[in-house]
Image (cartoon, helix red, strand yellow):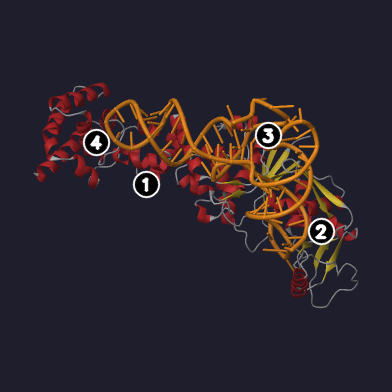
RNA sequence: GCUCCCUUCGUCUAGUGGCCUAGGACACUGGCCUCUCACGCCGGUAACAGGGGUUCGAGUCCCCUAGGGAGCGCCA
């Protein structure tokens, strides 16, 4: 069988974490089995669907690298097809017009709840023969009340539903437009979707969809319902748990592959392995190894994973992503200052996010206009003035600006002034970086460069002279 | 309320009847390394929801209870 999976978001907001994981698993499954991954936009709710949302979803998919083989298909462009199927159902007596008003239905539901039974449409319009004046009818699917429907699910196992639990769902609104349960069935059928991989909030809809498929004489696809992603406190993931939009993770300095890796491990595992390259995920992914239980989103672990990726990613790749963040901060590393790749290489071990990396490295590309108050107070004291002056002289005299020599100059200066390395390096660090935090002092001096080092040392010296 | 799903350290998970005095990872924590910040290395705390069965033997199979989640829309 040719594997065909799909991701079918409704464009009513951004691509969020849960959707991204659903997309990832569908994508992985298709890739793993040499199949196709289809993107379908479920925009039949015209009230809430927006093109901005469509673009946001597309943008998120692109950033994550979840490329689709077909689509995006838009349901709003397939209306004629849905009408055709609805008509077929009507013609075959598998669907009927319902003239119940909203008030009538509300009353019915209220009554059922009061009786402590499940609110369901009672099928009162099933045998109505004549239209009701002044009411545009909806169309309902005629569900078979007998027997049961078994969903054979790759993650949940076999799940049985009594058909009696299912009511006659609406497949076309009073304005004639089709509803979700109809469109999803028609599309999955027409697009030859072999595996429907989606959130388990759809598990309850599945028997209804299978019954429509059955009425249409079509074999259902294979289902896989993924458990939900919860917030850190175990409740439904929402904005108060932090970022839920995929693109926000980009803004916060995450690498797409780190997010993907994290999402993959949420609910899926391969023994004790924590880190998977995209290729490994494709090779090792096994949907039957997906957990049945919901998983809580843990920002700390994602942060750690991101750090791991920052540590080992190829430098050019990191530079590519870091450049975007420099741009966000109005810094243009190519306009002067050290080579961005050299900076990224030395900072990669001290950043958990690209935002940290860029912020920690901004001083390489910006003049020092003021020192971090605390750090200056602690390290830029009058007694280091002679040593700083001395170091400045030694550095200026160096024929080559090389790490080894720079290191030696610092060591020699410290020794000459009876200072321990810490007492020597920290003032220099504050002078060059503006704060008591930077890569090793020789690397810092090297990257800041001769001109800027001398200039910044001069600034520190005059700062100290003004103090005394 | 009804239907469906779920339940191993705080969190993500390994575990498919004996290899489990339950393993790994994050977080937390003690130490080492050290010119700062980090990285790294070594160590520690911490879980089978509860109760019944089945079995020589149960985290693993069955049942019940409890707790959590989802669905019950002219939303998807």
Q: Is residue A181 above or below residue A103?
A: above
Going from N to C along the chain, the mark reached first, 3 or 2, is 2
Q: Nearer the viewer, residue A333 or B31?
A: B31
Q: Establish whether labels 3 and 2 are both on one chain.
A: yes
Q: Residues within 10 Å of mark 1 (few under 14, many from 20)?
A: few
Q: CA distance from mark 2 to mark 4?
A: 71 Å
Identify the residue position indicated by label 2 in the image.
Answer: A165
Foreground disc of the pair 1, 3 = 3
Label 3 SS: loop
Q: Chain of mark 3?
A: A
Foreground disc of the pair 2, 4 = 2
Residue A36 x %, y %: 70, 38
Q: Which residue is at a point 70% across and 54% down the rendered structure image?
A: A75
Q: CA distance from mark 2 to mark 1?
A: 57 Å
Q: Residues within 10 Å of mark 3 (few under 14, many from 20)?
A: some
Going from N to C along the chain, the mark reached first, 4 or 1, is 1
Identify the residue position indicated by label 3 in the image.
Answer: A286
Residue A425 x %, y %: 22, 32
Identify the residue position indicated by label 4 in the image.
Answer: A429
Label 2 SS: helix
Q: Establish whether labels 4 and 1 are both on one chain.
A: yes
Q: CA distance from mark 4 to mark 3?
A: 50 Å
Q: Which mark is residue A329?
A: 1
Q: Chain of mark 4?
A: A
Q: Is residue B73 above or below residue A256?
A: below
């Amino acid at each position: 069988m040719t594997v065909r999976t799909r991701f079918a978001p409704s464009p009513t907001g951004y691509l969020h974490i849960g959707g991204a994981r659903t997309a990832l698993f569908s994508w992985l499954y298709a890739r793993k089995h040499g199949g196709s991954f289809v993107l379908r936009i479920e925009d039949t709710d015209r009230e809430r669907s927006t093109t901005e949302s469509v673009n946001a979803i597309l943008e998120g998919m692109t950033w994550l690298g979840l490329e689709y083989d077909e689509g995006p298909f838009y349901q709003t462009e397939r209306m004629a097809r849905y009408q055709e199927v609805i008509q077929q159902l009507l013609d075959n007596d598998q669907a009927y017009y319902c003239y119940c008003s909203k008030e009538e239905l509300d009353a019915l539901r209220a009554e059922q709840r009061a009786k402590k039974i499940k609110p369901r449409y009672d099928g009162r319009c099933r045998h109505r023969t004549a239209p009701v004046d002044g009411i545009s009818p909806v169309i309902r699917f005629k569900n078979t009340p007998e027997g049961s429907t078994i969903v054979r699910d790759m993650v949940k196992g076999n799940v049985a539903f009594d058909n009696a639990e299912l009511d006659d769902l609406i497949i076309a609104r009073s304005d004639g437009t089709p509803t979700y349960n109809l469109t999803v069935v028609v599309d999955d059928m027409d697009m030859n979707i072999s595996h429907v991989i989606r959130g388990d909030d759809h598990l309850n809809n599945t028997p209804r969809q299978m019954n429509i498929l059955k009425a249409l004489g079509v074999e259902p696809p294979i289902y896989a319902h993924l458990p939900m992603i919860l917030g850190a406190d175990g409740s439904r993931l929402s904005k108060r748990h932090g970022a839920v939009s995929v693109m926000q993770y980009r803004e916060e300095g995450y690498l797409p592959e780190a997010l993907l890796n994290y999402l993959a491990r949420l609910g899926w595992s391969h023994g004790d392995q924590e880190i998977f390259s995209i290729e490994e995920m494709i090779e090792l992914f096994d949907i039957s190894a997906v957990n049945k239980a919901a998983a809580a989103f843990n920002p700390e672990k994602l942060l750690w994973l991101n750090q791991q990726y920052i540590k080992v990613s190829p430098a050019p790749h990191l530079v590519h992503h870091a450049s975007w963040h420099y741009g966000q901060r109005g810094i243009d590393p190519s306009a002067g200052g050290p080579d961005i790749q050299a900076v990224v290489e030395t900072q990669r071990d001290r950043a958990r996010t690209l935002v940290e990396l860029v912020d920690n490295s901004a001083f390489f590309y910006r003049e020092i206009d003021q020192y971090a108050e605390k750090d200056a107070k602690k390290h830029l004291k009058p007694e280091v003035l002679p040593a700083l002056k001395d170091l400045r002289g030694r550095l200026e005299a160096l024929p080559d600006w090389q790490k080894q020599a720079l290191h030696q100059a610092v060591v020699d200066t410290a020794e000459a002034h009876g200072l321990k390395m810490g007492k020597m390096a920290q003032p220099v660090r504050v002078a060059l970086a503006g704060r008591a935090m930077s890569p090793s002092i020789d690397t810092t001096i090297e990257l800041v460069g001769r001109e800027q080092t001398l200039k910044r040392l001069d600034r520190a010296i005059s700062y100290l002279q003004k103090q005394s």
